[in-house]
Image (cartoon, rainbow, N blue to C red):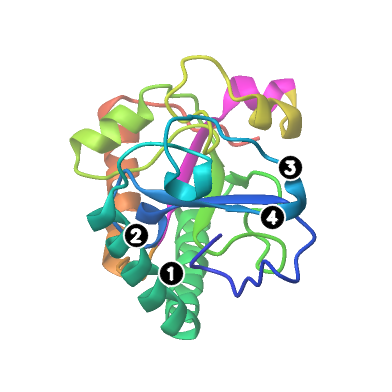
Amino acid sequence: TVGHLDLDFSKIPIDFASCSAHKFHGPKGVGFAFVRKSSGLKGLIVGGTQERSLRAGTENVVGIVGLGKALELSIENLEQYSTHIQGIKDYAISELKKVFPNIKFNGQSSNKEKSLYTVLSLALPFKNPLIGLQLDMKGIAVSQGSACSSGASKPSMVLMSIQTEEEMDTTTPLRVSFSSKTTKEDIDKLISALNEIVQENKIEINNN
């Protein structure tokens, strides 16, 4: 959510927060941690005073500068970016419903007021555990499962907690992320690719 919402950590009653720069178009492999002084957190890697003695070792200065600039741009353009991305997400939901009338959206993912506008978690009305790989082969990057277990071979505990056993057995989870660079044409390509996969593999759609 950092870089996508107007956050003021001085007013939020939390002790810790973390973020990854690539979530707002910064360099991969760098992030930051917010640690409240009163949290009592001790150093994890000792031997130096880098990062306020919480993690010793040479700092990735180039990555830090890149993160800072990317976050600055994201915050400066927050209203413009959020309006664009929400429009793309709304378009994706509308078009997916046209092609797959029985598609389901996990949790509150399709609720504009109760979900993050950059992510859509859905349950396709058919079973195909290879959907992520097949979409990747068509040049489309999406994830299966929840954000914390997209590459795991076993079902996501998050999805297991919000889906019924029948839904787990008859649907395919997919997580689609959007950014300020995503276009309606990208969504059209995704839906076209899903249609192709269904036809190529003679997949039976669940109409219940």
Quadrant holding the C terminus: top right
Three-letter amino acid code of the residue under disc 4: Arg
| Residue type of the residue flagged with mark 1 | Ile
Q: Position of residue 13 (x, y in %)?
A: 80, 60
Label 2 close to label 1 by CB (< 8 Å) = yes
Left or right: 185, with 207 as reference point: left
The residue drawn where x is 51% and y is 43% is 53
Which of discs 2 and 4 lies nearer the camera? The answer is 4
Alpha-carbon span between mark 4 and mark 1: 36 Å
Q: Is residue 81 magenta?
A: no
Q: Which residue is mark 1?
A: 88
Query: Does residue 124 appear left or right of residue 11 in this picture?
Result: left
Q: Which residue is mark 4?
A: 36
Q: 132 above or below 8?
A: above
Residue depicted at 72% across the width and 62% down the height? 114
Q: Position of residue 17 (x, y in %)?
A: 62, 51
Task: Tell whether label 3 touches label 2 (CB within 8 Å).
Answer: no
Residue 7 screen position, x and y as percent: 63, 71
**Label 3's element?**
loop
Mark 2 or mark 1: which comes first in sequence? 1
* Among numbered discs 3 and 1, the one appearing first in the sequence: 3
Residue assigned mark 3: 40
Q: Name the image quarter holding the N terminus.
A: bottom right
- Residue denoted by label 2: 187
